[in-house]
Amino acid sequence: MDVKIGTTKITLILGDITEQETEAIVNAANSSLMGGGGVDGAIHRSGGHEILKECKVIRQTLYPAGLPAGKAVATTGGKLKAKKVIHTVGPIWSGGNNREPELLAEAYRNCLALALKMGLKTISFPSISTGAYGYPTEKAGRIAIRAVIEFLGKNAGIEEVRFVLHSSHDLLVYEKELTES
Ligand code: AR6
């Protein structure tokens, strides 16, 4: 489904984030920026070694102690269709009382702000934190959709925000949230 928020289209699809042709795709990374499983593993596998090379430079320069949860950085998309990968780190779910909602919303906002700063008009997100990091999808979907809508209400310039969900269950959860928001 897709919905217009001002001049931006929010699209929800079932698919693989690595195959998206949006100018940027978002990686649900971990603080090390050195790769991992899930979305992170898939992006590094499909995008090739140029992505890791730039992640290493980011670690050596901007974030020697690792990228904190909620922050975002950009690298090349390497061999991907997307020209940029925006790496962010979602919170690890530990019951909901450790700033998880705040950090998850911040991750979405910082990715969008970075895309805008780089002049990118289309961006695809995975469902950050809902895999290895254990964030319940219903709760995370609500925060993701609301954070994006709120950002778009305050900032013009992005043409499409695409959520790429990996299961039909997750797609339904996000669709329900977008319909109700
Ligand atoms: N395209 C779209 N969505 C996907 C794909 C894909 N190719 N593969 C998995 N998903 P996760 P997290 C879904 O674990 O929870 C990594 O090891 C998946 O079904 O990728 O933020 C990192 O290095 C789930 O719904 O990210 C970190 O250590 C969602 O993407 C840690 O996992 C997110 O799952 C980050 O955990």
Image (cartoon, grey):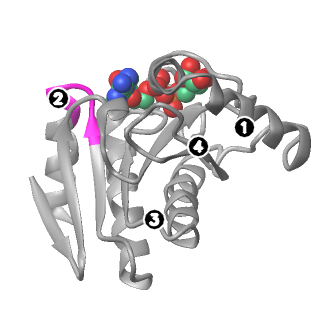
User: Residue 81: where, in percent of width, then height?
Assistant: 37, 39
Amino acid at the residue labelled 2: His
On screen, residue 12 versus residue 45, left or right, reads left
Which of the two discs, 4 and 1, labels the residue nearer the N terminus? Answer: 1
Residue 76 is tagged as 4
Label 2 near ligand 1 (CB < 8 Å) = no
User: Residue 149: where, in percent of width, then height?
Assistant: 33, 69
Q: Secondary structure at mark 2?
A: helix
Amino acid at the residue labelled 3: Leu
Residue 120 is tagged as 3
Magenta region: 164-170
Label 4 near ligand 1 (CB < 8 Å) = no
User: Distance from label 1 to label 2 (Cα)?
Assistant: 34 Å
Residue 169 is tagged as 2
Which of the two discs, 4 and 3, labels the residue nearer the N terminus? Answer: 4
Amino acid at the residue labelled 4: Thr
Which of the two discs, 2 and 4, labels the residue nearer the N terminus? Answer: 4
Residue at 28% from the left image edge and 39% from the top image edge: 164
Q: Nearer the viewer, residue 10 or 75?
A: 75
> Image quadrant of residue 15?
top left
